[in-house]
Image (tube, rainbow, N blue to C red):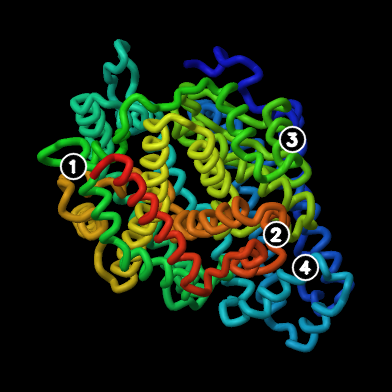
Amino acid sequence: MKRNEVKTEYKWKVEDIFTTDEEWEKEFSRLEKNIDFSRYAGKLSDSETLLKFFKADDEFGKAFDKVAVYASMKHDEDSAVSKYAAYDAKVYSLYTKYATEQAFFSPEMAKQSDEYLASLLKDKRFADYDYILKRIIKGKPHTVSEQEEKLVSMAGEVFYNFRETFSMIDNLEVPLPEIEFGGDKAKLSHGLYGIILRCDDRDKRREAYEKYYGAYDSLINTITAAYVGNVKADIFYSKVYKYGSCLEKALFNEDVDRSVYDNLLSTVDGNLSVLHRYVADRKKLLGYDKLYFYDMYTPLVEGAEMKLGYDEAYDYVIKGLAPLGKEYQALLKKGYDERWIDVEETDGKRSGAYSTHAYGVHPYVLLNYQPDLDNIFTVAHEMGHSLHSHFSSLNQPYAKSNYKIFVAEVASTVNEVLLLKYMLKNSTDAQFKKYVLNYYLDMIRATLFRQTMFAEFEYAAHDAAEKGEPLTKEGLCAIYADIGKKYYGTAIEHDYNISCEWARIPHFYTAFYVYKYATGIISAINIANRILTEGDSAVKEYFNFLSGGSSTDPVSLLKLAGVDLSTDKPFDFAMKEFENTLTEFERLMGI
């Protein structure tokens, strides 16, 4: 489908940021000409000057966010439109110039006395910046000189190209072939591939699987070069900033203790037998002599799929999230009515789904909606992101409005769990309940177990590179295959295609991101169950978390919602939820 064939009500209203491209260009030019932070250099020991710096940074940031989000959204509408690809590139260049202009800030602040920095924390004028100041104090050992900071900032534009290269490969260059499905021939897009994997025609699933991975395998040498370059960039940054490893740098940047990461991996590793049990159940229920990875997504319960058009699905989501209260539901309706959402899959459009926002403007959601249960959950998921952004921006000053990536998947997954529990509670159809239980098992498998498996892969890849071992396509495929065998066990066939699955995962270009999906669903399962069992008091505490932005570290923010990831309790609860769901599913299925 071409973008001009989509009805207006199903396109996001990007003009709420800038009404025209000319307005964007004018604002971009203004920002480009007015980056002048160097005037503050050497003067930050004066609190008045420092306060002016912070306020000027806020004003630039608010304007830059709008320019960046608009360019990104327009580019994502159709990657083939060179004008918006140029906009996106210009934004990154502007950010590089901004970062270079600010290169003096961290080194200069790191030189300030502890007494001076402590006095700023007590000064009410700096209330908006107290968390930034605490991070400056904590980050002193990882600060470099002003000249080094400038060089690193300049290098950023070069290193960005690895991620951009993969993005172009993934969205435009992968030679995805045509496939016949449902009586029609169509290009095997990312969205269509997901639909076929869930269909009951095994031959068609196998055909799509082989064609899809064959397309990536045809470019695996190029993809390997892009990924290896990205890993080397991660190592460069970790060494420059004096971290012991890329993981240490990633955790420090998120202000997350290593114990949380270790808790996740150890808990999952200790519960892989339950995942193996589920895989074996799937093989038994499907009645196959051999189970393949293209069999992992097709529903185990027949005749219970929920196929809703977008409008009906959105209404259903609003009803399902009633436990969060009328204010939350009204905001969901507002997002629908005021075109926050880009709905249809179109030629050249970025695959998948995401939420984005700029301070002072409502959030936006990109979808590639298909009429199935997975996409209904995607609507709830992305609106969870958006309303998290809404509450954080509404209740925090700009400097604290952007929540850490570590908690970014919590609100979205709370919505999914609540919607699923709504389905189970309000359906009298035994087949549908079995179907939803199966869906929940797959949700936890894909978001908790699978993302932790991804985390193990990227840790192994970075660890090998940090030890000086060369990364090759053969080596990366071998690492991925070994980890896959550990996670999925012996009930499934581990073929070549799945060994190169790593080559199609966009999130690997933001290192040590994926484990946060797992901690996110663990937190969400705990929060959703509190909301459903404790009611208004738990909702109130959850809204405190949603409104927290980056006012403190993310683990402390989650404690506001009753989840303490520094303990084993939430991890154990989530694993028990998976086991209990599996037991109930087995009971209903008679196995």
Q: Does residue 155 appear anywhere in the picture?
A: no
Instruction: Point out the frontmost of discs 1 and 4.
Output: 1
Q: Which residue is mark 3?
A: 330
Q: Residue at x 74, y 35 (%)?
A: 330
Question: Closest to the observer: 377 or 553?
Answer: 377
* Amino acid beneath label 1: Lys
Q: CA distance from mark 1 to mark 3?
A: 45 Å
Q: Quadrant of residue 229?
A: bottom left
Q: Which residue is mark 2?
A: 541
Q: CA distance from mark 1 to mark 4?
A: 57 Å
Vertical placement of residue 112 versus 132, above or below: below
First in sequence: mark 1 or mark 2?
A: 1
Q: Residue 23: give x, y in percent of width and height.
A: 76, 31
**Proximity of marks 1 and 2: CB atoms separated by less than 8 Å:** no
**Proximity of marks 1 and 4: CB atoms separated by less than 8 Å:** no
Q: Residue at x 38, y 27 (%)?
A: 304
Q: Residues within 10 Å of mark 2 (few under 14, many from 20)?
A: some
Instruction: Point out the frontmost of discs 4 and 2.
Output: 2
First in sequence: mark 2 or mark 3?
A: 3
Q: Which residue is mark 1?
A: 284
- Number of callouts: 4
Which quadrant is the C terminus positioned in? top left
Q: Which residue is mark 4?
A: 129
* Amino acid beneath label 3: Ala
* Amino acid beneath label 4: Tyr
Q: CA distance from mark 4 to mark 2?
A: 24 Å
Local secondary structure at mark 3 = helix
Q: Residue 494: give x, y in percent of width and height.
A: 17, 48
First in sequence: mark 1 or mark 4?
A: 4
Q: CA distance from mark 2 to mark 3?
A: 19 Å
Instruction: Point out the frontmost of discs 1 and 3.
Output: 1
First in sequence: mark 4 or mark 2?
A: 4
